[in-house]
Amino acid sequence: MRDQTVPFLPKYRRYGLILLYGLTAVLLGSDVWPAILGADAQTDPIRGIALSIWGTFSLLAVLGIRYPERMLPLLFAQFTYKVIWLCAFALPRWRAGTLDPSTDGLFHSMAIGLGFDLVLVPWIFVARSYFARFFVFGSDHARGAEPG
């Protein structure tokens, strides 16, 4: 019997998450792993950090294919870094008319990825599963205590 305190995720939403994890693993992984494996002593350390983080996302996305609901925090992090990058770095350059071709390509990739995140992440399930507890003050459930 299913625990009634945990929100139900319909199959089509679950498959949407699996698709998103699969796209992340394949598209991001195929782009980032050749750069990681081909890195040398001359690679900029900041670029190395970015590549390492993206490599981590691509590897953890494989786990998301098997455990879509449990790996949702990975998608939160992915969604958040895209929003921050688009708002803090790409948008000011776009508004000033100073987007170079490299940044323009990243801008489009991030915007398309953000669109996939917005459509495929089950935001109502996320709100009920992850954030609803923060707004129930004074109860044992809000403090993370197990019922019963």
Image (cartoon, rainbow, N blue to C red):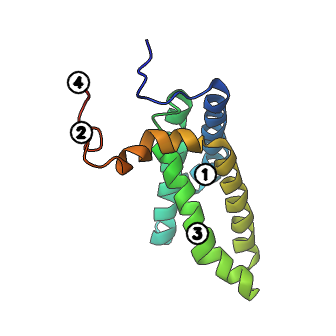
Callout 4 crowding tier (Cα within 10 Å): few <14, some 14–19, many ≥20: few
Q: Residue at x 56, y 29 (%)?
A: 9
Looking at the image, is 64 positioned above or below residue 79? above
Q: CA distance from mark 2 to mark 1?
A: 49 Å
How many badges with numbers are in the image? 4
Which amino acid type is marked by label 3? Trp
Callout 2 crowding tier (Cα within 10 Å): few <14, some 14–19, many ≥20: few
Contact between labelled residues 4 and 1, with CB atoms less than 8 Å apart: no
What residue sits right under mark 4 in the picture?
148
Q: Where is residue 121, by image quadrant?
A: top right
Earlier-in-chain disc, 1 versus 4 = 1
What residue sits right under mark 2 in the picture?
140
Helix, strand, or loop for circle 4? loop
Q: CA distance from mark 2 to mark 3?
A: 38 Å
Residue 13 numbered tag: none
Q: Residue at x 59, y 61 (%)?
A: 82
Q: Position of residue 8 (x, y in %)?
A: 53, 27
Q: CA distance from mark 1 to mark 3?
A: 23 Å
Contact between labelled residues 3 and 2, with CB atoms less than 8 Å apart: no
Residue 85 numbered tag: 3
Contact between labelled residues 4 and 3, with CB atoms less than 8 Å apart: no
Helix, strand, or loop for circle 2? loop
Earlier-in-chain disc, 2 versus 3 = 3
Q: Nearer the viewer, mark 1 or mark 3?
A: 3
Q: Position of residue 146 (x, y in %)?
A: 25, 30
What residue sits right under mark 1 in the picture?
34
Helix, strand, or loop for circle 1? helix
Q: Where is residue 125, by image quadrant?
A: top right
Q: CA distance from mark 3 to mark 4?
A: 44 Å
Earlier-in-chain disc, 4 versus 2 = 2
Q: CA distance from mark 1 to mark 4?
A: 51 Å
Give the position of the N terminus as an image quadrant: top left
